[in-house]
Amino acid sequence: MKNEMLAMILAGGKGTRLGKLTQNIAKPAVPFGGRYRIIDFTLSNCVNSGIKNIGVVTQYQPLILNDHIGNGASWGLDGLDSGATILQPYSNNEGSKWFEGTAHAIYQNIDYIDSMDPEYLLVLSGDHIYKMDYEDMLSKHKKNNAALSVAVIDVPWEEASRFGIMNTDENDRIIEFEEKPENPKSNHASMGIYIFTWARLREVLLNGFKKDVDMYDFGKNVIPFYIKSGDNVHAYHFEGYWKDVGTIDSLWTTNMEFIDNEGDLNVRDKSWPIYSKNPIAPPQFITSAANVKNSMIVDGCFISGEIDHSILAANVQVKEGSVVKDSVVMTGASIGKNVTIKRAIIGENAIIGDGAVIDGKEEIAVVGNSEVLGVMINEG
Amino acid sequence: MCAILGNEHEYNGLLPLTANRPLSTLYFDCKYRIMDFALSSAVNANIRTVYMILNEGRVKSVFDHVGGGREWGLDSIGSYQYLGFYQDILRKKAEGKPYFNDMIGFLEKAKSEYTVFFGNKMLCNVDLRSILDVHQANGAKITVVFKRVPKEKIAPDDCILTLTEDNRVQKTDIFSELEDNQELYNLSMSIFLVKTDWLLDLLHKGQNAGAPASVQDLLNREMTRVKTRAYEYTGYLSNIHDIKSYYDANMDMLDPEHFNALLFSSQKVITRTKNEVATHFYDKTKVKRSQFATGCIIKGEVEHSLISRRTVIEEDAVVRDSVIMSNANIKRGATIQYAIFDKNVEVEAGVRIKGTPENPVVITKGSHVVADIYGGEK
């Protein structure tokens, strides 16, 4: 396919349910697995699927995300005919243009998409941990002669009412879309991954906004419109690892599962590498005082404490006498002496003073990015 | 400033580790290559033009590592990397042709007021800006960097400086030719700072007068011919010229003091980044006083060792006092002590490999070890 499909990643979401962790960064920039930010999985999937141009639509707290993506070099997107383009909201003579929904964000960036002149548009969210071959989805899209293909995953029936559910006919044509239905008729949940034949979507969006028909959201407006106007909408069935890490609980659980069942995601598979922007840091140092078990640790860490069933990202320091158990410690956090951390997520560059106790016995404890905890500040 | 990285000198004492790579691309401390230190010192001092003198047939690992120079910021506008071959210089010299023209061309194109020359085997983290300050103030033609070291830290062919009280170079000697026994020697670190115009003049005249083809040798000779000042380096230094010194330098990094001095100084050491998963320590691992790069799977026991990228150590395997380069696969129950593994080594289950601290066993690149190896005797 190569350049026939352009990817747009909608990365402007706040991720409200991640609380403190997204106070100063967008959800797709939240770290995962000690080495990654959530969006790395989507970006790597694109590159591994042969997509060479990616627009990343940012809005909420984009600084860290923009810095992370840069010119896309970490994903090999800095070549002659490839690129990662950060698309931010802008104003013009018609007024300011905050993105007011998923489809609106695409509409606002029509100029960018036109400049790339793709035949197909892949719309992604950058909020999930998964591996998927979008090239395969495109080939099905073409085979079905579809105007729109929606990736779906079968979820347990009891959870189906939490998702956007696609009801299909025997040919996997989507005949009805229901957002969070009380009594779901199927368990095919939308993954928020769409392939549009661009010419048709362009027309639908332009018409809609011109005639004041609501076309702000793909789920609420665009997909129902496609179905109603008789466009060929197909479901693309995905099976495999796919995790939403949009809550503290799910982020923590998914990280813990990453230690226990690394194989499910198979990040070591060289045929489908997950790329990230890697910091340059010295190797990790495990000292004589340390005790490390069941854990994943990366460069720049300096460990003198006990680490059990935890993930430590780059440049984390854990001093003597401290215990870190069942926890996720993000980049640059510094943990003093005799600290106890259990069932917790410690944000980037947080500082935990000597003797502090953080125990998420009831619910997962969270220390925010750059938060300082239990450090005596001598103001005398 | 611009930089010349000289790689002419190779040491047989480092074989077989340098059989297929220059000394400067030897691995160090899990993820660095020795040249990273000189190159990082250079770019930390805003140097963006670099000339490397290499030996023929030994460029693959250099290209593989430096590539376009992105990590070092050597790929942006105004930066410039260039390679020259020592054998080419020797050949031209033998044919009676001007043999420094290539380097002269580089220096003219670089248009830098000052040039710094680095040898290849001194592992250190120097601040070139402060050396430049001293050079500009002292009015000398050459400023040479040295460190006071005991004799165990010196290779036979190293250059030892005799200095006046105000650190002027009075005399230079080859270490092996010195007879007196001193506690500390002024070891030249083969880092020279000179004015580019002066160097151009030296190269022009030198190639018409049969000067040494090695720039390092040429500058060593000039130290007693022109006014030369010595700048004392007080940071961490390893002088890597044989297996023992290479092993000791690596093991030094397990001393937090040396590790911090070299790698957490105000000058960041840059190396090539790779995409790797976090290193995964399993349930029954026992890990003490060791360093790890990313991408490893550790199920066994590791003590006082350096483990590079993508190493797998299976259950009940034990690695002690060893330097393991990337991609080793150490199977169940194997025990390894006092060894240096080159890349891609595979050790079968239950195999024992044991050297001594003085003579660590070296396992060559790509070896598949199926039987016990006991080394240490010479």
Image: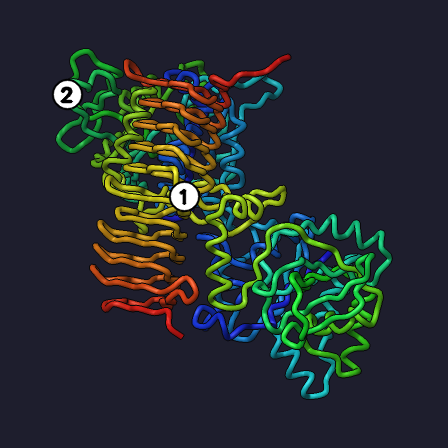
- Figure colour scheme: rainbow
Answer whether residue A9 is visible to the viewer in this image.
Answer: yes
Return the residue at label 2.
A157
Q: Report x, y in % for residue A195.
A: 33, 34
Amino acid type shown at disc 2:
Trp
Find numbered disc 1 in the image and state the secondary structure of the residue it sits on. loop
Image quarter of residue B181: bottom right
Q: In terms of sequence position, does the residue under pointer 1 or pointer 2 come before the other?
A: 2
Instruction: Please give the name of the residue rendered at 24% of the width and 51% of the height, measured from the top-left corner.
Output: B314
Q: Give the letter of the chain under mark 1.
A: A
Q: Report x, y in % for residue B136.
A: 83, 53
Q: Report x, y in % for residue B206.
A: 78, 77
Instruction: Please give the name of the residue rendered at 18% of the width and 32% of the height, measured from the top-left corner.
Output: A172
Question: Mark on residue A275?
Answer: 1
Q: Is residue A260 left or right of residue A11?
A: left
Q: Residue pushed farthest left? A: A170
Amino acid type shown at disc 1:
Tyr
Mark 1 burial class by Cα count in 10 Å: few <14, some 14-19, many 20+: many
Instruction: Please give the name of the residue rendered at 57% of the width and 73% of the height, measured from the top-left corner.
Output: B55
Q: Residue pushed farthest bottom? A: B95
**In the figure, B163 relative to A149: above or below?**
below
| Viewer-side residue, B369 vs A84 | B369
| Viewer-side residue, A16 vs A336 | A336
Q: Is residue A219 left or right of residue B212?
A: left
Image quarter of residue B192: bottom right
| Viewer-side residue, A197 vs A102 | A102
Answer whether residue B75 is visible to the viewer in this image.
Answer: no
Q: Report x, y in % for residue B200.
A: 79, 69
